Image (cartoon, rainbow, N blue to C red):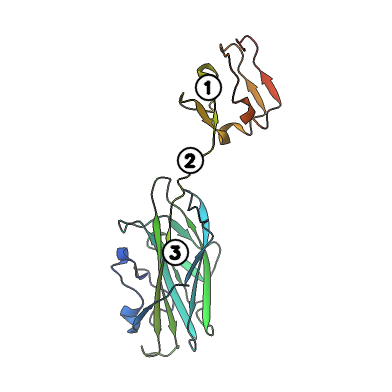
Amino acid sequence: TSSSGGRTDGRSGSPGDANQDCGQCHGASTASSTSMIATDIPASGYVGGSTYNVTVSVAETGASMFGFQITAEHSSNAKAGTFATGGNSEIYTVTADHAVTHNNTCTLCTGSKSWTMTWTAPSSGSGDVTFYVAGNGADGSTDQTGDVIYTDSQAAAEDVTPAPTTAIPDANFEQALINLGYDNVIDGGVLTANIDTVASLVVSNQNISDLTGIEGFTALKELYCWSNQLT
């Protein structure tokens, strides 16, 4: 019970935490688990900057007190993304929001305990990450006997699926879209997400001969394109 309010140093069992976990203080042996971490990150992977729910669960028959610490790391062992409590009063963030641990408001349970938090992914291009967690199922006594430490890890790939684009073969049409802020380089296409909510488009007097790609403007209600060379 020496850390009934959680630890503020790295104790997730991760490489970046020097593989330190709850067992270093509780004196218990550490066992691996495969069911402590659950997230709503899709199978395709996380999207940079997006926020996801993460749930940590610890189960131990006969245990009456539970605790944990979770973090996320890159393959370099550097911390990845940031955690937040998501309004959960039973947990708090540590190590500059790179980890979450329990507080002492609800460690007393019977047989199992779960905590849910949020994790905001690092920026796009950061690569795959791995979540690491260490959990403790303790008997509530003041000595180290009867405590069981579990660790788990779960990889999360980055979603690198290219964003959908709409072909714009006419360079003058694409330049007009660049001038309007919907594109940034003439490369024969524009991100569909940049144009599919546009309701009014003015591309008059731009020497455009081909409006192919206009079909990507699915919300378009007004189109002004006089004084062009449409064929």
Q: Residue 101 carries which label?
A: none
Which mark, by number, is residue 162?
2
Q: Is residue 79 above or below residue 11?
A: above
- Does residue 206 appear to the left or right of 15 in the view shown? right
In three-dimensional space, the C-alpha distance between marks 2 and 3, rounded to whole angstroms, equals 33 Å
**Amino acid type indicated by mark 1:** Pro
| 92 shown above or below 139 | above
Q: Looking at the image, which residue sits at the far front? A: 231
What residue occupies the far left of the structure in this picture? 18
Tag of residue 93: 3
How packed is label 2: few (under 14 Cα within 10 Å), some, or many (20 or more)? few
Asked which secondary structure carries label 2, the reply is: loop
Residue displayed at 44% across by 51% down: 158
Label 3 element class: strand
Question: In terms of depth relative to the viewer, which is nearer, 159 or 141?
Answer: 159
Q: Is 220 on the left-hand or right-hand side of 194?
A: right
Asked if the residues shown at circle 2 and circle 3 are in contact, with their CB atoms under 8 angstroms apart, the answer is: no
Residue 191, above or below 210:
below
Place of residue 7 in the rendered image (x, y in percent of width and height, measured from the top left): 38, 72
Q: Which mark is residue 169?
A: 1
In the rendered view of the protein, which quadrant contains the N terminus?
Answer: bottom left
Residue 174: percent from the left, percent from the top? 52, 22
Q: Check the image and report above or below for 184 versus 71.
A: above
Q: Which comes sooner in the sequence, label 1 or label 3? A: 3
139 left or right, relative to 73: right
**Residue located at (44% from left, 82% from top):** 137
What separation in Å lies between label 1 and label 2 (alpha carbons)? 19 Å
**Front residue of 96 and 211:** 211
